[in-house]
Image (cartoon, helix red, strand yellow):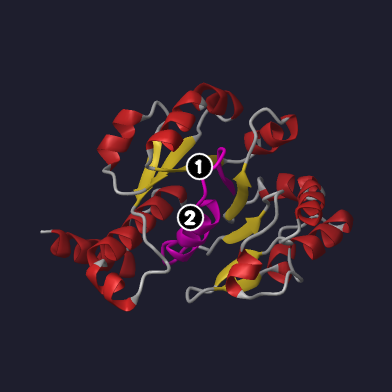
Amino acid sequence: MLIGLCSLKSSPGVTTTALTLAGAWPPGCPRPTVVELDARGGDVAWRFGLATDPGLRSLAVAARVHPAPDLLAVHAQSVGAAGVPVVVAPVERDAARHAAVSLSALLDVLGKVPEPVLADFGEVDLKDPDARSVLAGVAALLVVARAVPEQIARLQAATQDLLRVHPQAKAVVVGDIAHREAAGMLALPVAGVLPLIDPDAGPLARLAGLRSSRSFKVAAMRLAIELSGGIEPTGSVREAVNDHAEVSR
């Protein structure tokens, strides 16, 4: 199952959202692989100090001969404390674009298997016919936007075009906003709201933001559960949700 994540102009946060969802995937379900398909160049390699090979470039070469789902495991690297498997893209724009374009056959195959794959398309141009074709082929499309006026307005203006590209497209809103409020501002269905957490905050700020951090984890878990097929939360997911309820009282 191929799940696409993208953003519109000047709306960052797609890669962080993809990594967060993969890390929050429900226990007992196959952990999704994140594939960086941002034609402008990847972020994960430099952010986590990784080599770019194995990665998108080596995957593109291998997939020319045999576009099979098991190639992802060979060309992915483990990222973060959660050990999220990520196929990292080259930092250079031209190399990343060339590799991404070369993977169309593999993407078709990945769209037909049950195992989840999160495709990080980064910022997309809906006027680009190639971008529209790729987005139309995913099982689910999530459009990431910050909860700020200019990004909400841009997403609102693009709603009809997004729905023409993918009738089941949904928004993921990142910021200090309630789900009901976000849904009331957008014509595009809202799949979930993720609180904005500052990754560069110092220890005291992080301690003060414990409630927000917990809310972020629970919101990510709930969205991951929905994407994974609406399974009932079990184990650590249910405990985290219950813990969040206690803290929020």
Examine the rendered structure and indicate whether residue 9 appears above or below residue 27.
above
Label 1: few (<14), some (14–19) or many (≥20) C-alpha neighbours in 10 Å: many
Asked if marks 1 and 2 touch (Cβ < 8 Å), the reply is: yes
Residue 218 left/right relative to 86: left
Q: Name the residue: 70% across, 50% down.
A: 40
Q: How many numbered marks appear?
A: 2
Name the residue that disc number 1 marks: 142
**In the image, 141: left or right of 113?**
left
What x and y, as percent, mark residue 188? Answer: 43, 29
Q: Which of marks 1 and 2 is nearer the N terminus?
A: 2
Residue at the limit of the structure toward the right, as seen here: 65
User: Which mark, residue 97?
Assistant: none
For residue 212, which quarter of the picture? bottom left
Query: Where's residue 29, x and y in %?
Result: 48, 62
What's under tag 1, amino acid-wise? Leu
Q: Residue 249 in the image: state x and y as whole percent.
A: 10, 59
Residue 17: in magenta span? yes
In this rendered view, identify the residue nearer to me: 186 or 190. 186
Residue drawn at the location 37% of the way across and 69% of the way down? 201
Q: What stretch is highlighted in magenta?
A: 1-29
| Disc on res. 17 | 2
Is residue 93 rendered to the left or right of residue 174? Answer: right
